[in-house]
Amino acid sequence: MENSHECSNKVKDVSLQELRDRLAEFARVRGWDQYHSPRNLLLALVGEVGELSEIFQWKGEVAKGLPNWTSDDKQHLEEELSDVLLYLVQLADVCGLDLGQAALTKIIKNAKKYPVNPTTYN
């Protein structure tokens, strides 16, 4: 990002709105808006998901917390996860959707669809 938007490596609770705004500015100052159609962003997102999948492709099951991964492997994973997130945020933005609100609505919908059954989970 531009120097005025530099951020530290460890920022807590970054909002989707902040990501959206930074991505929009990043694209705008580079003249990339013209290429950021929903279709193009979706195809870029799919490509990034493929790159993310490659990281796990031959590892078999992976333990939570990635205890056997090197710091380089974890950094690579962070980068690919970030690429997926950033394209998803951009896609929602160019489609005029509030991704955060949509996600919360989906969680509520899923809670109704899959109610807690105490006998199943105890």
Image (cartoon, rainbow, N blue to C red):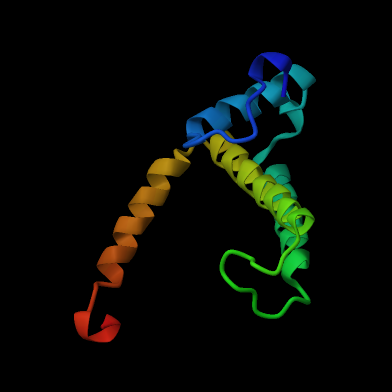
Camera-side residue: 35 or 62?
62
Quadrant in which residue 74 is drawn: bottom right
Of the 4 image quadrants, the one containing the C terminus is bottom left
At horizontal 25% and vertical 66% (from top left) the residue drawn is 112
Q: Is residue 117 above or below residue 103?
A: below
Q: Could you tell whether 110 is left or right of 29 in the image?
A: left
Q: Position of residue 116 (x, y in %)?
A: 24, 73
Task: Please give the count of numbered marks on the rendered protein.
Answer: 0
Residue 94, position as x, y percentages in the image? 59, 35
Q: Residue pushed farthest bottom?
A: 119
- Horizontal side, residue 10 vs residue 98: left or right: right
- Figure check: 11 above or below 84: above
Question: Which residue lies at the image location 20% right of the left edge and 80% below the top edge?
Answer: 118
Residue reaching furthest to the left: 118
Q: Is residue 20 above or below residue 87?
A: above
Give the percent coordinates (x, y) of residue 32. 76, 27
In the image, taking residue 69 as reference, residue 122 lies left or right, namely left
At a point 49% along the width and 31% down the height, the residue shown is 17
- Which one is nearer the viewer's eye here, 8 or 58? 8
Taking depth in this image into account, of 16 and 41 the one nearest to the observer is 16
Outermost top residue? 4
**Picture quadrant where residue 72 is located:** bottom right
Is the N terminus in the top left, top right, bottom left or bottom right quadrant? top right
